[in-house]
Image (cartoon, helix red, strand yellow):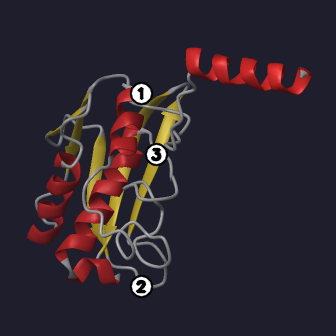
Amino acid sequence: MKKILILSLAVILILIFPFKVHAYTTLSAKWSSHTIRYYYDSYISTRAKTFIKKGADGWNGTDVNFELGNAGNYNIYCTEVSNSNVDWDGLTHSTWYGKYFTSQTLYLNKAKTAWNYDNPLQSVAVHEFGHCLGLNHSSGKVIMNPYTYGDNSRYGTYKLTTIQSDDRNGANALY
């Protein structure tokens, strides 16, 4: 009888005070503003410029606004590299002070396979801009899944090129 009473009380508490479950994880910092400016030099390829824009635009509909800045006014420097000696197709390097980012560099690696195909490259670019917001890797069917290809990967398995509700929830929780 005592076990039934405890179980009933637990069920009632869960119904009255539901727990919010989310899969997103965050980094130790975020930007101090809801408007974040990115910039790229004119000499990078048209392809890189296209997918940098798609990556930034992929977060439309969240509480953050990415916009293209200029050489004297930006938060995130975006560029392309060609390095076949590394295992990443995109990378974001962040510096921060306290709880706020001070600068970031976003790299798209054109030596990797995702570079040759539109959808995987869009998946990489949107994913990297998620790091620029302050989101960390999460597992499952989310754009912040750390893997482009392989088992349970964001593109190879799930074919994701856009943010999912958990990604959106993470961005909105930060900002």
- What is the C-alpha distance between the residues marked 1 and 2? 36 Å
Tell whether label 2 touches label 1 (CB within 8 Å).
no
Which mark is first along the chain, 2 or 1?
Answer: 2
Instruction: Give the x, y percent position of residue 43.
Output: 13, 65
Say which of 102 and 157 sits in front.
157
Q: Is residue 67 above or below residue 111?
A: above
Q: Which residue is mark 2?
A: 84
Determine whether 28 is above or below 1 in the image: below
* Residue 48 lies in quadrant: bottom left
User: Reading the chain from its start, which is encountered first: label 3 or label 1?
Assistant: 3
Q: Nearer the viewer, mark 3 or mark 1?
A: 1
Which of the 4 image quadrants contains residue 132? Answer: top left
Tell me: 44 left or right of 131: left
- Name the spot of residue 117 as percent of width and height, x first: 20, 80
Q: Which residue is mark 1?
A: 173
Crowd tier of the residue under label 2, counting other residues whose Cα lies within 10 Å: few below 14, some 14–19, many 20 or above: few
Regarding residue 70, the answer to whether it shows in the image is: yes
Q: List the residue tagged with mark 3.
A: 94
Q: Residue at x 51, y 52 (%)?
A: 138
Query: Which residue type does callout 2 highlight?
Result: Ser
Mark 1 crowdedness (10 Å alpha carbons): few <14, some 14-19, many ≥20: few
